[in-house]
């Protein structure tokens, strides 16, 4: 029997196998092409034009928790925030608030008697919610800056260089969109890096650039006294990010505490003391819950050079940690009252 008519002949079996393989490959390519087209042509998720009653209630709980410095109530606030998001996943502000709560819980986790390893999942959730907020409201530079910070944090946790780079360049885009706001955001996010690294020097330069923008001129870096520029305070336009506001009641004081910390870490104690002292110019300084921490930093600046460059352990007190590593990471700017 000829081989082409014998179904059991080796040549016939090979031929059929090759035909079947070709068919599978072709089908796979078609399926892959269809899936790519299907995904690419899916309707874009758009922002809602209205907000639900539950979202407004969640807003109120969010601000009460944040301004009150009630870290212990984050779970309660996050529960209602998440419920509001699930009710309307097209609400950009609700998504951003959920991301912020996850970020806050992770950022100030040193408050906890024992920090669980699973708290790192908050970085993933923060990034996911900020991604949604940016997608729904791409013109909001603050959301973009927070997304960049979340990406950096997640990349650091997972030692994922690609994610870290994505976070860095997202931050750089946010700086271009609103430099008065996001130069601080980017610099603060990078302030954990080694003081002798190029990225740390860049982060410190971002703080100087913020001062220049807020002052409307180049600041004297040998004598960075900000008092001559207090009359520029405003609650409108991009420069509102330079001053205290309802959202961040002690933004001014927190900015100078962080910048002072960064200068101390860089070994510039003399300039750091002058920068710390600028916080006292705030009309709200006497009401700032964390002013004692700043005053102690002015005293301890010489010895904190080594402390801020050392590894942090659970036993390291806040007085020996960079602001970004303390239990007031967020509260230095956002807490309006309550015992620190």
Image (cartoon, rainbow, N blue to C red):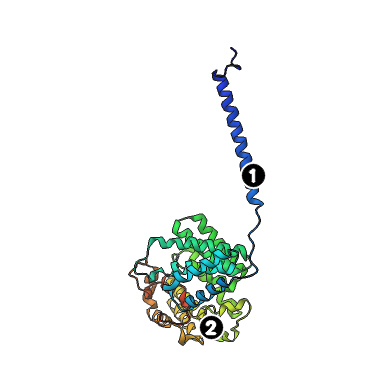
Mark 2 or mark 1, which is nearer the start of the sequence? Answer: 1
The residue lying at 48 percent from left, 68 percent from top is 79
Residue 72, image quadrant? bottom left
Compare residues 124 and 227 and report the one nearer the observer: 124
The residue lying at 54 percent from left, 18 percent from top is 8
Mark 1 neighbour class, 10 Å CA radius: few under 14, some 14 to 19, many 20 or more: few
Q: Nearer the viewer, mark 1 or mark 2?
A: 1
Work out how far the residue at label 1 is from the one at label 2, CA to CA, in angstroms: 60 Å
Q: Is residue 274 above or below residue 49?
A: below
Which residue is outermost to the top? 1
Q: Quadrant of the N terminus?
A: top right
Can you tell which mark lies on residue 311?
none
Compare residues 203 and 60 and report the one nearer the observer: 60
Visible residue check, residue 281: yes
Q: Which residue, given by chain and number where applicable, does mark 1 sit on?
A: 34
Q: Position of residue 300 (x, y in %)?
A: 37, 78
Horizontal relation, residue 12 to residue 158: left or right: right
Residue 10, image quadrant? top right
Q: Position of residue 34 (x, y in %)?
A: 64, 44
Q: Quadrant of the C terminus?
A: bottom left
Describe the element under mark 2 as helix, strand or loop.
loop
Q: Position of residue 315 (x, y in %)?
A: 32, 70
Q: Position of residue 77 (x, y in %)?
A: 48, 71
The residue lying at 62 percent from left, 39 percent from top is 29
Horizontal relation, residue 238 to residue 79: left or right: right
Describe the element under mark 1 as helix, strand or loop.
helix
Q: Which residue, given by chain and number where applicable, does mark 2 sit on?
A: 226
């Amino acid at each position: 029997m000829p081989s082409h008519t014998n179904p059991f002949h080796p040549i016939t079996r090979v031929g059929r196998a090759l035909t079947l393989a070709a068919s599978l490959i072709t089908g796979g390519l078609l399926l892959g092409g269809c899936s790519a087209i299907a995904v690419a042509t899916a309707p874009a998720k758009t922002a809602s034009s209205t907000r639900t009653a539950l979202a407004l209630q969640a807003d109120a709980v969010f601000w009460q928790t944040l301004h009150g410095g009630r870290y212990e109530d984050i779970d309660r606030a996050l529960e209602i925030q998440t419920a509001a998001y699930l009710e309307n996943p097209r609400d950009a502000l609700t998504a951003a608030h959920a991301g912020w709560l996850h970020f806050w819980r992770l950022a100030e986790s040193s408050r906890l008697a024992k920090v669980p390893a699973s708290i790192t999942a908050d970085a993933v959730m923060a990034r996911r919610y900020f991604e949604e907020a940016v997608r729904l409201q791409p013109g909001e530079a603050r959301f973009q800056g927070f997304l960049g910070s979340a990406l950096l944090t997640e990349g650091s946790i997972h030692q994922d260089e690609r994610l870290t780079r994505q976070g860095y360049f997202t931050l750089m885009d946010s700086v271009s969109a609103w430099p008065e706001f996001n130069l601080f955001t980017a610099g603060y996010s990078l302030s954990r890096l080694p003081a002798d690294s190029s990225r740390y020097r860049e982060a410190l330069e971002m703080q100087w650039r913020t001062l220049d923008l807020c002052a409307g001129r180049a600041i004297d870096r040998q004598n960075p006294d900000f008092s001559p520029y207090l009359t520029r305070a405003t609650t409108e336009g991009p420069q509102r990010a330079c001053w205290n506001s309802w959202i961040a009641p002690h933004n001014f004081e927190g900015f100078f505490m962080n910048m002072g910390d960064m200068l101390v870490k860089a070994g510039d104690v003399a300039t750091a003391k002058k920068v710390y002292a600028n916080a006292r110019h705030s009309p709200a300084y006497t009401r700032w819950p964390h002013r004692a921490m700043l005053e102690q930093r002015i005293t301890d600046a010489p010895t904190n050079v080594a402390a801020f460059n050392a590894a942090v352990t659970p036993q390291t007190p806040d007085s020996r940690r960079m602001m970004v590593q303390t239990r007031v990471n967020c509260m230095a700017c956002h807490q309006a009252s309550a015992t620190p």
